[in-house]
Amino acid sequence: MSNQSIDRDLKKGSAELLILSLVEAEPRHGYEIAKLIETRSNGAVRFRVASLYPLLYRLEERGWIQGHWVEKAGQRRRRFYRLMPAGSKILAERRTAWAVFVEAVRNITGPEYA
């Protein structure tokens, strides 16, 4: 298994958590979400448009986020996404599950257990 496929699998498993977390504080558009993920992860996690936007649409279809178009003079039209109550519930569940998973991995891989 290559590093690229491992990275892809890790990203796939955490993508919804990352997006929901970023739109929790304020509405954000897709490009901003992608840039924040890349910046906050110091470039370790990146999303291509081809994978990010279908994911945003799926989250919207599930009712976890809601998008609305915003037009500003001199700028392109952008779709901003905000967290919905159902998304808040899922986000809380995913954060708890992620914390349990990270702790389990730490217990297995930590040097004190080697």
Image: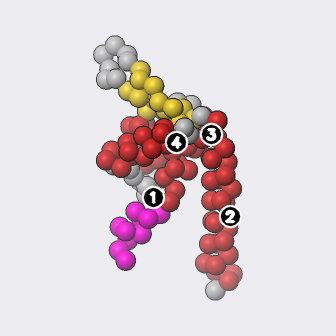
Kindly identify which residue carries mark 4.
62
Q: CA–CA distance between discs 3 and 2?
A: 22 Å
Residue 94 image position (x, y, % from top left): 62, 53
Mark 3 vs mark 2: give the one in front.
Answer: 3
Q: Amino acid at mark 4?
A: Arg
Q: CA distance from mark 4 to mark 1?
A: 17 Å
Q: Are marks 4 and 3 in contact (CB under 8 Å)?
A: yes
Give whichever of discs 4 and 2 has the lower sequence position: 4
Question: As drawn, which residue projects farthest toward the top?
Answer: 73
Q: Amino acid at mark 2?
A: Val
Q: What residue does disc 3 label?
A: 86
**Is 101 in front, or is 39?**
101
Q: Residue at x 45, y 25 (%)?
A: 68
Work out whether 38 lies above or below 84. below
User: Label 4 to label 2, Cα distance in Å?
Assistant: 25 Å
Question: Disc number at residue 70?
Answer: none
Region of the chain picked out in magenta, as a range = 1-10
